[in-house]
Amino acid sequence: TLESRIATERTDLAKEREVDSFIGLHRPEYVFVAAGKSGGILENQARPAVLMADNLLISCHLIHYSYQHHVKKLLYVASSCVYPKHCQQPMKEEFLMTGLLEPTNDAYATAKIAGIKLCQAYRQQYGFNAIYLLPVNMYGPRDNFDPNSSHVIPALIHKFVSARLGVRPRTTLDFMVCAVRIALTSTRHRFTLLIKKSPEFLQGLSYFVAYE
C-alpha cells in the first residue's frame, strides 16, 4: 500500500533533491513537519552548527516543496525553546521574540524560529496554508536516553537506572536525589499530573521513589 511504502522509505530531508522527489512522487495532501535534529544541553553546546544548519535545511526544503507540489496544508512543529529565556508565565504566543533566548540552545531555537517565520512568509506571499504548533517538552516511549544528547527527564531516568544497576556511584545518586527534590518542590502539582498520565515515567523513577 502507499502507507507502507512511505513508512519504510528513508529520505534525507536536509537534501533538497530528495525532498523534492519524495513529495513530488507521493503527492501528499497534508504535511506534518515533526522531523529535525535536537538534543539536550550537552548536545546543543557541542554541536550548535549541526543542529542549526540541519534544522534550517529541513524546514526550508519541506515548506518550499510542499508549496511547490500544491500540498493543501502544512503543520510545522516548533519547540518551546523558541520563547525567551525569561518569558512571562504562563507562556503565550505573543511573547515570541520579545527577549533573549536561552544561550545554551539559541542556535537550535533560532532555526526553529526561522521555520515559524517561513510558514508565515509563505502564507503572506503565496497564500500557502502553513501553520505551526509549539508543543511543550515531553517524555514518552522511544525517547532518546543517551546521557550525552538527551533532554532532562530521559537523562535523569537513565541515571537512576544506572544507579540501581550499580553502574553509577552512590554519592552521585545522593546528589541527584537532592537536586530532583529541590526541583519538584516548585512544580509538585505539574509533576503529580505527569505521573498520573504516564505510568512509564513513574516506573522509570521507581528507584527515586523507593530511595525517598
Image (cartoon, rainbow, N blue to C red):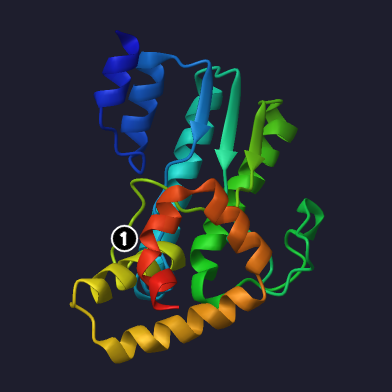
Which residue is pictured at 63% across the width and 46% down the height? 116
Is residue 53 at least partly visible in the picture?
no
User: Residue 132, percent across and down?
Assistant: 64, 40
Front residue (pair 167, 23): 167
Question: Mark 1 sits on what residue?
Answer: 145
Which residue is pictured at 18% across the width and 77% down the height? 167
Q: Quadrant of the C terminus?
A: bottom left
Q: Quadrant of the N terminus?
A: top left
- Characterize the local packing of mark 1: few (<14), some (14-19) or many (20 or more) Cα atoms within 10 angstroms: some
Query: Is 15 left, or right, of 180 in this rendering?
Result: left
Query: Is 8 left, or right, of 85 in this rendering?
Result: left
Q: Quadrant of residue 158?
A: bottom left
User: Residue 155, percent across and down?
Assistant: 37, 68
User: Residue 69, percent across and down?
Assistant: 50, 19
Front residue (pair 171, 18): 171
**Rendered view: 39 above or below 62:** below
Which residue is pictured at 64% across the width and 42% down the height? 133
Q: Quadrant of residue 16?
A: top left
Which residue is situated farthest in the bottom direction here? Answer: 171
Disc tally is: 1
**Rendered view: 137 above or below 45:** above
Which residue is pictured at 32% across the width and 87% down the height? 172
**Rendered view: 141 above or below 173:** above
User: Residue 162, percent across and down?
Assistant: 24, 72
Is residue 27 at least partly visible in the picture?
yes
- Which structural element holds mark 1? loop
Three-letter residue code for mark 1: Phe
Query: Is 68 left, or right, of 49 in this rendering?
Result: right
